[in-house]
Image (cartoon, rainbow, N blue to C red):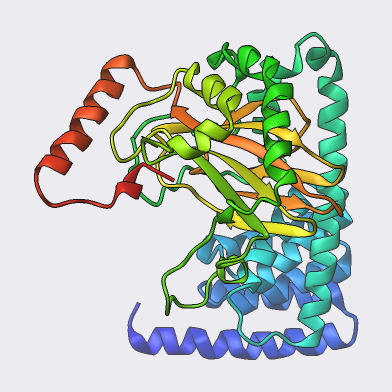
């Protein structure tokens, strides 16, 4: 096609489009559709002509004609906002709930890139959000109902990963990844709360809860004077999520082991606790592991979302004093601590804690190896850190410590 022919076709399309708009204004939808179809045939790469044709079909009640015209636009540009909006409205009008929800969600994503949105579009986006949320809720309820019998025969511990899969697919749960601030060990499962079966010795630890709590209460009776702020940033550090807790006793700790070193004075004051920890299968990596401490969270204190330093380890919590209103989130799962019930988690997955009560919360915390590491991998990691220390480069001990 030469340039003169192209210009003639464009001029013809513009003239036909003008006639179509006049017919549309008169409510002559069938006539308008015929004129817009001729215009689009003359200049098939002009999205506005197909949009106008879709409008005429909509006025004439020709749903499939409207769908075909909108599809032509989306074939040219799948991110065309008007075409996506009109297709979402068509799906909704025809009761195609799943398709409408998908298309409205796409509209919301496209609109995020627009810096200035007119009021009419904002109102449309409000509708999109409401529709997507309503349909998502209905779909989730239908899935839950359909799975009720199948889930009923499976213990919660065995269907935990499946339930997380379904919740993620339904948009009820985010996907979280391990994001360590120090050493990352590749290919380990991003397991938020580890399955208890990996830690059969937790039963032995829980039996000691009463004795450990008694020793903590003795420290508490002395006024917790030996506890120090858990967050101690260097002078001049820029403002960040920890600023509110910097050098604050709202979150405090008394260490029994730190960076692999036993704190003899602390252990002497808590011999039952020290013996209980020593009896656990601790990881021994000089200058790094184990770390064990009493963690105290004062009333109305929130620990902001954060990540730990290495997924090569697992963190153990043994709750000692837990008033109502204390909870803990790792990734997409939030649990309430229960005194005497231990758990293990991967602290390199985003986590946060709340004490919304008017009382103190106390937990015994220590670390051990990630259960998904093999014995050979544990030996190699220990050798790696010994080699880095021997090199004289003196890397920060926190590459795997607390």
User: In the image shown, does 309 or 153 lie closer to the viewer?
Assistant: 309
Q: Is residue 245 left or right of residue 147?
A: left
Q: Is residue 220 left or right of residue 149?
A: left
x, y (%) of residue 29?
85, 75
Q: Is residue 294 above or below residue 17?
A: above
> Residue 230 appears in which quarter of the rendering?
bottom right
x, y (%) of residue 6?
42, 84
> Residue 88 appears in which quarter of the rendering?
bottom right
Q: Is residue 43 above or below residue 306?
A: below
Q: Residue at x 71, y 33 (%)?
A: 319
Q: Residue at x 10, y 49 (%)?
A: 392
x, y (%) of residue 4?
37, 89
Residue 210 can be seen in this image: yes
x, y (%) of residue 204?
62, 12
Q: Residue at x 87, y 71 (%)?
A: 59
Q: Is residue 398 left or right of residue 69?
A: left
Residue at the extreme top of the image, as rendered? 153
Q: Report the quarter where the N terminus lies.
A: bottom left
Residue 171 can be seen in this image: no
Q: How many marks?
A: 0
User: In the image shown, does 105 or 389 lie closer to the viewer?
Assistant: 389
Q: Residue at x 36, y 37 (%)?
A: 261
Q: Is residue 102 above or below residue 388?
A: below
User: In the image shown, does 266 or 290 lie closer to the viewer?
Assistant: 266
């Amino acid at each position: 096609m030469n340039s003169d022919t192209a210009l003639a076709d464009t001029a013809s399309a513009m003239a036909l489009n003008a006639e179509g708009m006049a017919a549309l204004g008169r409510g002559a939808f069938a006539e308008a559709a015929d004129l817009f179809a001729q215009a689009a045939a003359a200049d098939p790469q002009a999205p506005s002509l197909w949009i106008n044709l879709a409008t005429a079909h909509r006025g004439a009640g020709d749903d499939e004609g409207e769908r075909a015209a909108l599809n032509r636009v989306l074939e040219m540009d799948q991110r065309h906002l008007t075409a996506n909006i009109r297709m979402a409205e068509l799906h909704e009008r025809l009761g195609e709930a799943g398709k409408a929800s998908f298309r409205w969600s796409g509209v919301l994503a496209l609109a995020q890139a627009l810096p200035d949105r007119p009021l009419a579009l904002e109102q449309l986006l409000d509708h999109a959000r409401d529709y997507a949320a309503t349909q998502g809720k209905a779909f989730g309820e239908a899935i839950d109902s359909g799975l009720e019998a199948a889930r009923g025969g499976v213990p919660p511990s065995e269907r935990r990963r499946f339930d997380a899969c379904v919740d993620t697919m339904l948009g009820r749960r985010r996907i979280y990844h391990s994001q360590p601030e120090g050493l990352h060990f590749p290919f380990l499962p991003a397991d938020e709360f580890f399955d208890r079966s990996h830690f059969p010795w937790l039963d032995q630890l829980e039996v000691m809860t009463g004795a450990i709590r008694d020793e903590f209460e003795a420290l508490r009776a002395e006024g917790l004077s030996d506890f120090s702020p858990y967050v101690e940033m260097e002078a001049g550090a820029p403002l960040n999520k920890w600023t509110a807790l910097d050098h604050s006793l709202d979150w405090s700790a008394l260490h029994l082991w730190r960076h692999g070193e036993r704190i003899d004075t602390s252990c002497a004051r808590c011999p039952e606790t020290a013996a209980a920890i020593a009896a656990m299968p601790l990881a021994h990596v000089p200058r790094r592991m184990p770390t064990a401490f009493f963690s105290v969270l004062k009333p109305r204190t929130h620990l902001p979302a954060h990540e730990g330093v290495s997924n090569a380890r697992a963190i153990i919590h043994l709750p000692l004093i837990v008033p109502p209103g204390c909870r803990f989130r790792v990734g997409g799962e939030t649990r309430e601590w229960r005194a005497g019930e231990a758990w293990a988690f991967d602290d390199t997955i985003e986590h946060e804690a709340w004490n919304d009560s008017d009382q103190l919360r106390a937990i015994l915390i220590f670390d051990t190896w990630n259960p998904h590491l093999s014995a050979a991998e544990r030996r190699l990691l220990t050798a790696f850190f010994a080699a880095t220390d021997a090199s004289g480069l003196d890397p920060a001990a926190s590459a795997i410590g607390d």
